[in-house]
Image (tube, grey):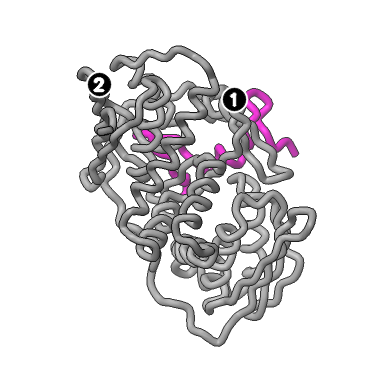
Amino acid sequence: MIRYCSRCGVPKILTAEHRWDSSGTITLARDPSHRMVIVDNVALTNILDSLEVRAGAPIEAIVTDAKRKSGRHFMDALLSGVKGVAVRNLASASVYRRLVNQASILGLGHAEVTAYRRHRFLEGVITDAYSGPAIAGDICGAFDSVEGRAGDVHYEVDAAGCLHLAIEASGRARPAGPDGAAASAPVLQGRNIFELCPVCKAPVELGARFSFDMDHGTIHESKTGHRVVLIGVISLKGLFGELEAELGPDIPEAVMTVEKDRVREVIRGKGKDLDTGPEGWLHFIRTLRIRGMGNGTDASVSGDNVKVRVENPYFEPLVAGFLAGFFEATTGREAGVAWTRSDAGHTDVTIEPALQ
């Protein structure tokens, strides 16, 4: 069986299960309301490490719990109605086999189920896990949903870097309702038109920018070599929302700063002179769309001040940090950054030299 497109190298199942929309979003083919995004795993790791330093204490439990809530919400939606009853009663083992395959497709790592007993326990091994606490939460959330009861999760990483995961059903009732879900802003229609691969119909830009290894469960950006992962927007927002609730209201600003610093260094490392006029900014923000991060529609430059509008942003602080990193890399000046909430479907990011 040929798993990759012979023309562009994108996994066929990835293209079959996801849609790259003209609005600058990526959605599930079977559920257009469920949005996905390609994020730099180096950025995600750096952000979590930075927040842990700020907190002065481990945050693994917060990360695992947040991902557990979003994982449970996703599986509850997937297994709703009569289909869910049938799967939970007759084919629960097959759900986990499908999930470990899905993890590889999304770049989350290569997972194997090593032991399972219905309503009792689930054990597995994950190699090349994108994040130990996060993937533990992802899988535990699925367990809560499939088994209909809360599970206690434990994991450890061996000397070879493999993550060993064990989930045992507890006596606690699992929380009811779609907790961990975030309210969605309206999706504004865009006019992006992707050139499609003539064989698999994936965006040509997808195969040109990323390389896929389904055997190891990894995806890498071709130019930087950075690992990326494809995760749910609700999952990402839930994670940062939980961290903000636990660690304080300055978390969005901290997230923006870490992303700004990362993007600045990536751009500086390329050593190219870049256009910083309106057209240059528009060219830069077009890179958001293939990742499902949003649709950059407007950019204006007035002296040292820049204002950019991004429709359907996946997470406003990260979009703001992405843009501020470009400003600092191209001007050599520290950026002062402000952004608006995207309740109306867009965020306006204002960037100017920071006050000294």
The answer to whether residue 85 of the structure is visible from this angle is yes
Please tell me whether the stretch drawn in magenta is mainly helix, strand or loop.
Answer: loop
Distance CA(mark 2)–CA(mark 1):
30 Å
Side of 206 where 34 appears, left or right: left
The amino acid at mark 1 is Lys
Mark 2 and mark 1 residues within 8 Å of each other at the beta carbon: no
The kind of secondary structure element at disc 1 is loop
Residue plotted at (22% across, 18% down): 303
Mark 2 or mark 1: which comes first in sequence? 1
Is 271 rendered above or below residue 247? above
Residue, disc 2: 304
The residue lying toward the viewer, choosing from 138 and 267, is 267
In this view, the residue in front, 129 or 261, is 261
Assess disc 1: are there few (<14), some (14-19) or many (≥20) residues with their C-alpha within 10 Å of its C-alpha: few
Nearer-the-camera pick, 88 or 188: 188
Q: Is residue 79 visible?
A: no
Q: Number of numbered discs present?
A: 2
Say if the magenta span includes residue 12. yes
Q: Is residue 275 above or below residue 167?
A: above
Residue at the disc numbered 1: 223
The magenta stretch is: 1-30
Q: Is residue 183 left or right of residue 129?
A: left
Mark 2 residue element: loop
The outermost residue toward the front is 356
In percent of width and height, residue 264 lies at 45, 29
